[in-house]
């Protein structure tokens, strides 16, 4: 079965757990435990095929044994990088994380990460306290070749679910393409057989 690992990253309090819980349970409960990192698991079906989704929810508080951002980036296939539209410093952190994913991605062979990094501006319901303009985030997304969304875990369920499904779909397409590159296709295998098979016979 295909396994897809997605890390939800971003600075403290931006709503990472709220987004994950909204996707998994359809609910917004307001307060979320954040004393340890955890991996949520969900079974999904994409194009009729079962997928095991793992969602990594980091813990912002320091504790012994906490994984590093580098380890989180190496673990995941896809990344949902979250900032809070009412907190400018969280946007700057998101920007640094996106750059780091790009840098480390190249080192770990994740070259085709364009469709696997989503920049997400959360807490859209707090737009009266907005510190990050939508256009600015769009510019960053264009510059870093990642997809951009703005929403509210508190108010939107469908939009949140759509983001997670889209990420799973993109990661699934990526892993299929990798598989195709590793194995020669049926017609390519036939061609190789024809060419080298014939040659061997004539020697
Ligand atoms: N108004 C509003 N508040 C939100 C939204 N999403 C999350 N929050 C609130 O923001 C606070 C932090 O949310 P969390 O989901 O715990 O944030 P986090 O990123 O997981 O935080 P850490 O685990 O500590 O890093 C909580 O009080 C949530 O209720 C949103 O869309 N709108
Ligand atoms: Mg959390």
Image: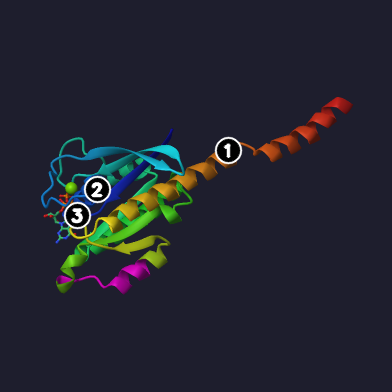
The residue that label 3 is drawn on is 15
Q: How many marks?
A: 3
Residue 4 location in percent, x, y?
A: 39, 40
Locate residue 127 relative to residue 70 in the image: left or right. left
Which of label 1 and label 2 is nearer to you? Answer: 2
The quadrant of the picture occupied by the N terminus is: top left
The answer to whether one can see residue 184 in this image is yes
The quadrant of the picture occupied by the C terminus is: top right
Residue 142 location in percent, x, y?
A: 41, 67
Within-10-Å neighbours for mark 1: few <14, some 14–19, many 20+:
few
| Residue 48 is covered by the magenta coloring | no
Mark 2 CB within 8 Å of ligand 1: yes
Q: In what element is the residue under mark 3?
A: loop
The residue sitting at the right extreme is 202
The residue sitting at the left extreme is 31
- Report the Cα–Cα distance between label 1 and label 3: 38 Å
Q: In what element is the residue under mark 2?
A: helix
The answer to whether one can see residue 203 in this image is no
Disc number for residue 20: 2
Instruction: State the residue in front, 2 or 70.
Output: 2
Decide which of tag 2 and tag 3 comes sooner along the chain.
Answer: 3
- Report the Cα–Cα distance between label 1 and label 2: 33 Å
Instruction: State the residue in front, 3 or 58.
Output: 3
Mark 1 and mark 3 in contact? Answer it, CB < 8 Å: no
Residue range (magenta): 129-140
The residue that label 1 is drawn on is 182
Mark 1 and mark 2 in contact? Answer it, CB < 8 Å: no
| Residue 131 is covered by the magenta coloring | yes
Quarter holding residue 136: bottom left
Which of label 1 and label 3 is nearer to you? Answer: 3
Residue that appears at 28% across and 49% down: 8
Residue 77 location in percent, x, y?
A: 40, 44
């Amino acid at each position: 079965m295909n396994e897809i690992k997605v890390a939800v990253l971003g600075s403290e309090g931006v709503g990472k757990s709220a987004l994950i819980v909204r996707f998994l349970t359809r609910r917004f409960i307001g307060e979320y435990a954040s004393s340890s990192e955890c991996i949520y698991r969900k079974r999904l079906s994409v194009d009729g095929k079962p997928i095991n989704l793992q969602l990594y929810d980091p813990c912002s508080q320091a504790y012994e044994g906490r994984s590093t951002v580098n380890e989180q980036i190496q673990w995941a296939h896809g990344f949902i990088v979250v900032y809070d539209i009412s907190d400018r410093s969280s946007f700057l952190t998101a920007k640094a994380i996106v750059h780091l994913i790009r840098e480390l991605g190249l080192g770990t062979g994740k070259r085709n990460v364009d469709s696997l990094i989503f920049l997400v501006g959360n807490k859209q319901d707090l737009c009266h306290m907005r510190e990050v303009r939508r256009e600015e985030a769009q510019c960053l997304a264009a510059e870093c070749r990642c997809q951009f969304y703005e929403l509210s875990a508190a108010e939107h369920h469908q939009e949140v679910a759509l983001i997670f499904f889209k990420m799973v779909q993109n990661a699934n397409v990526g892993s299929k393409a990798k598989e195709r590159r590793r194995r020669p296709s049926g017609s390519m295998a036939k061609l190789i057989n024809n060419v080298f098979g014939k040659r061997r016979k004539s020697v």
